[in-house]
Amino acid sequence: MSTTDVLWTFLLGKRIGNAPPPMFLKFRSSEIFILSTIVIAVFTDMFLYAMVVPILPFALVDRAGVKEQDLQKWTSILLSVYGAALAIGSPISGILADRSSSRRAPLLGGLLTIGGATALLMLGRSLPVLLIGRILQGLSGSLVWTVGLALLTDTVQKERIGQAMGYVTAAFSAGALCGPLLGGVFYSGAGYYSVFVLGFAFVGIDILMRMLIVEKAIATQWCPKEVSVSGDSAHQGAGEEVKDSASAVNAQAPSEKSKVITTDPIPTFMGCKLPPMILLLRIPRLLASLFGCFVQATALAAFDGVLPAHVKNTFHWNSTGAGIIFLTLVLPTLTSPFFGYLSDRYGGRYLTTFGFLATIPFWVCLRFITSNTMGIKVLLCILLCGIGFGLTMGLVPLMAEIDHVVALEEKRHPGRLGKKGGAAQGFALFNAAYAIGIIVGPLWAGFIVESGGFGMVGWSLSILCAVAAVGTFCWTGGRILLKEGAGAGEDAV
């Protein structure tokens, strides 16, 4: 044993040479600690994204020299480039994560990205620097969501994956809620730099948590009997790194695996084997889930583009009132762990379908928000709350569904998605679908509100949710038209 082995073991997150087991190995590789780490990572990422939203107009004018008449344009651009970077970076992050020797390494790499992004936004005094900062934020988000969710599926038992995704969604919502609130308070009370001091405090906690985690598959190299890897072999990414005594869950005779791959080769196009991400996109069940995630993101992002202006023009509210009204939309998402539990217990098909359908009457009734009365204001709060609950009910099971689809594909075709099972690439597709929704939502709502008014935005989104409900009802959990037990098998490619 050498000090160098110990250092590299800590930095790389896998055993080097004869390094002894890390301190508190059992706790650091436990399900609750890894889940807590991913929750904090997601919260920090979303908090840093959202905390600059209320101060962007001031930064653009006071620090970057943007003229008042160009303020709205550049604010929209800075918001949009985050979604674009998230969409582009997610597939790349998924491929790198599934090819990496551990999930921890790319997750730590995301810390450098988010640290650099926050520093650029804090110190930047020109548009190019601020744009680069927002792009780096998007790339960091792609790493956190893609690699973090893949690590979660490696760790959490399949029967609890929905509830775990619920906690992640709740962390996302909490970051979206606390970011603008604390960012605005710190900016008004202590100035521009104080906002980023707060942000770096959260980054510090995030760094500590990510440095301490030990993947379960890595922990088995020291104590195979005490630390068990997640129950589903489809999620085991470190099978080649785990000792034979700890690989029982992955045990499969070489001749049997070879036989499966020989009789069912990887599909090709023009003589070239299709990459795992393309193979996943050929599964209708996964496409239905991705479309549902896209609809959910589009619906929420649509409000960002039109709700503040509508309440300003209708109720004559200032920016504070326009910000507070979003609480009625975001607070219901904190119930995500409950809906995740229901998804684990009863399945996701009816829960997510009912969630999308339940939003339709609330969308349609947005057409009544036309006058400045107390009753109409209360009605708007009720409508936004109902939409928030419905979309939350729909999203959480779909996130778990992506994990189930990837695991099933790996089980039916061992090795087709790569040695790590393709979980990261599956969630990369989820991330990309959600990011596209973030981009499309404001554009969708902005175009419709100009041509048909605020009420027409509600009508259009109700139709979109109805289409998503049809897709999730037909495909979530396997094709509804097939007998139970047959649908899952035939959904895969």
Image (tube, grey):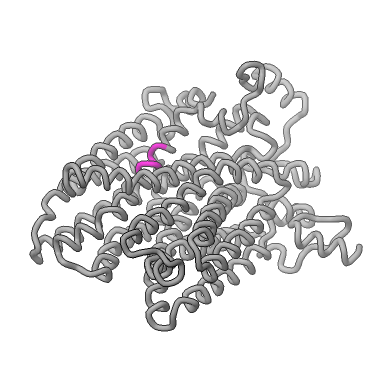
Residue 65 among those drawn in magenta: no
State the predominant SS element of the stretch in magenta.
Answer: helix
Instruction: Tell me the residue at 19%/63% (across/down).
Output: 312
Question: Which is more toward the observer, 337 or 47?
Answer: 47
Q: Is residue 147 above or below residue 42?
A: above
User: x and y percent of residue 73 in the render?
Assistant: 35, 55
Question: Which is more toward the observer, 323 or 383?
Answer: 323
* Residue 458 visible in the displayed image: no
Residue 93 shown left or right of residue 183 in the figure? right
User: x and y percent of residue 303 in the render?
Assistant: 29, 53
Residue, far right: 1
Instruction: Tell me the residue at 66%/44% (across/down).
Output: 96
Quadrant where the C terminus sits is top right
What range is drawn magenta here?
291-295
Residue 294 among those drawn in magenta: yes
Q: Quadrant of residue 326?
A: bottom left
Q: Is residue 17 above or below residue 277?
A: below
Instruction: Tell me the residue at 72%/45% (across/down).
Output: 238
Q: Quadrant of residue 264?
A: top right
Residue 157 shown left or right of residue 400 in the figure? right
Question: Which is more toward the observer, 55 or 487?
Answer: 55
Q: Is residue 219 above or below residue 125?
A: above
Quadrant where the N terminus sits is bottom right
* Residue 309 visible in the displayed image: yes
Instruction: Tell me the residue at 41%/27% (across/down).
Output: 479
